[in-house]
Image (cartoon, helix red, strand yellow):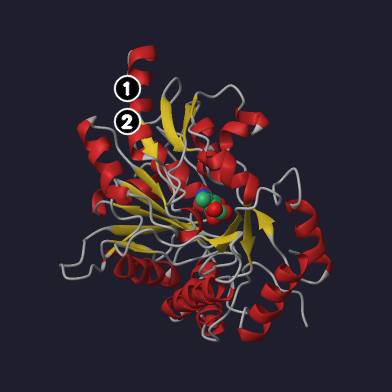
């Protein structure tokens, strides 16, 4: 059997047609028909709602999800000396752009059932930062970890009460929904990622969901070196080279034809893990805590409840053993407040992310994980136990 990876890119077959069109028309640049059409596809995908009129948000295609977070922060006016509240339980790319802007991340821990930002702890953190610094945090970055919706309505309620804008990091939550609405469309800005390991890919890429046409234009301005509308090169702001290439966008257009299929597959893989581990009392497959949440299950994750398989105990030997058998697995994200690079950042913790990091494991979940692979993965984990 081939090595089984967590999540590999999977093509529809239409990608090359769009790339060919780009070559045939010589649109081999970071703008063009594929970029425009991919943005339209993404906007239609993100704006649809169950039982309600579609939203009217706009999307800008960019070179990476990290670039989207960075530009989102710029749009929210985050700068030197500001604080930005970030989910601690995440990948470093959620928080690093805060530092690019000369601001300080303030980490907030997760809820035990969604694994995402705890709305109560968020409010405590806001109050405490206001008391300590005399000013409000400039933005809030909740994350949809492994595709699980956060309690975004509660987070938005707190954010509105304190009038703090929200930048949703939906890099892992592409197409996940909360109360019928696509994750990434609740806050002021939303982030998508099309890295090679994500739900759909453009090899590398990302997008920023913007509230309207005006803000979209502004994001495009910053993404293309902040060039002012003069006949010569005039710059009044610092810009970035963050636009998506028309070739990558061609891959994206092809991927959009299978986006729903990919999501359904990841959801099926999750259901299978739930069934197959149901006779293992020591294993819990992370599952949406409420019917209002429709995760894409980008990665299925399990946690060991036996106290034996911890990251400083039996978990790493298990990962090594599975790797030797051709199965890729990895621990859950190490929380940002435990990262040496963020040791001095303020953190509001409740033990949840530390516990999950200690006993959790990501399992292969992508398009190449079928019946045979599932049988093999589950059998080998059970053997090890
Ligand atoms: C939670 C999260 N945020 C942000 C990113 C950054 O996205 P990208 O790799 O497209 O820059 C990723 C993934 O890589 C991620 O998992």
Looking at the image, residue 384 sits to the left or right of residue 150; the answer is right
Q: Identify the mark at residue 305; answer none if there is no mark.
A: none
Report x, y in % for residue 175: 39, 66
Whole-percent x and y of residue 143? 44, 48
Residue at figure coordinates x 33%, y 70% from the top left: 45
Q: What element does badge 2 sit on?
A: helix
| Position in image of residue 266 (x %, y %) | 51, 73
- Could you tell me how far apart the alpha carbons at marks 2 and 1 are, in whole angstroms? 6 Å
Q: Contact, CB < 8 Å: mark 2 with mark 1? A: yes
Location of the N terminus (image quadrant): bottom right
| Occupied quadrant, residue 302 | bottom right
Q: Give the residue number, with chain letter if any, for mark 2.
A: 123
Decide which of 68, 246 is in the foreground and name it: 68
Local packing at callout 2 (Cα closer than 10 Å; few below 14, some 14-19, many 20+) is: some
Classify residue 309 as left or right of residue 194.
right
- Residue at the disc numbered 1: 127
Q: For the point 44% across and 19% down, which residue is it?
A: 81
From what the image shows, is residue 10 above or below residue 359? below
The image shows residue 163 at horizontal and vertical percentages of 23, 32
Seen at 56% across and 78% down, the residue is: 23
Whether residue 309 sits left or right of residue 71 in the image: it is right
Secondary structure at badge 1 equals: helix
């Amino acid at each position: 059997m081939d090595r089984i990876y967590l999540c590999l890119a999977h093509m529809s077959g239409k990608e090359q047609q769009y790339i060919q069109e780009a070559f045939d028309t010589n649109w081999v640049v970071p703008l063009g028909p594929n970029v425009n059409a991919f943005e339209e596809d993404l906007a239609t995908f993100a704006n649809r709602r169950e039982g309600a009129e579609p939203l009217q948000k706009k999307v800008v295609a960019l070179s990476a999800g990290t670039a989207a977070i960075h530009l989102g922060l710029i749009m929210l006016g985050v700068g030197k000396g500001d604080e930005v509240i970030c989910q601690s339980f995440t990948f470093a790319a959620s928080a690093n752009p805060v530092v690019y802007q000369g601001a300080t991340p303030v980490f907030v821990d997760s809820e035990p059932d969604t694994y995402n930002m705890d709305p109560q702890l968020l409010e405590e953190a806001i109050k405490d930062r206001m008391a300590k610094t005399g000013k409000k945090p400039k933005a809030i970055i909740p994350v949809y970890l492994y595709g699980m919706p956060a309690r975004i309505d509660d987070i938005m309620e707190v954010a509105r009460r304190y009038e703090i804008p929200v930048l949703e990091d939906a890099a892992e939550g592409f197409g996940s929904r909360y109360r019928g609405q696509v994750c990434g469309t609740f806050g002021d800005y939303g982030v998508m990622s099309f890295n090679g390991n994500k739900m759909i890919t453009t090899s590398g890429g990302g997008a920023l969901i913007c509230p309207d046409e005006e803000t979209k234009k502004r994001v495009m301005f910053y993404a293309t070196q902040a060039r002012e509308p003069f006949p010569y090169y005039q710059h009044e702001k610092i810009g970035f080279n963050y636009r998506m290439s028309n070739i990558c966008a061609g891959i994206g257009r092809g991927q959009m034809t299978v986006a729903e299929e990919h999501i359904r597959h990841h959801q099926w893989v999750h259901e299978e893990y739930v069934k197959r581990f149901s006779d293992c009392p020591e294993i819990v497959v992370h599952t949406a805590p409420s019917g209002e949440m429709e995760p894409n299950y980008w990665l299925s994750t399990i946690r060991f409840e036996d106290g034996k398989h911890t990251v400083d105990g039996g978990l790493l030997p298990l990962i090594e053993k599975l790797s030797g058998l051709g199965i890729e697995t990895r621990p859950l994200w190490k929380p940002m407040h435990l990262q040496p690079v963020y040791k001095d950042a303020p953190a509001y913790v409740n033990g949840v992310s530390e516990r999950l990091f200690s006993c959790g494991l990501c399992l292969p979940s992508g398009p190449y994980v079928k019946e045979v692979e599932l049988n093999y993965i589950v059998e080998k984990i059970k053997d090890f136990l």
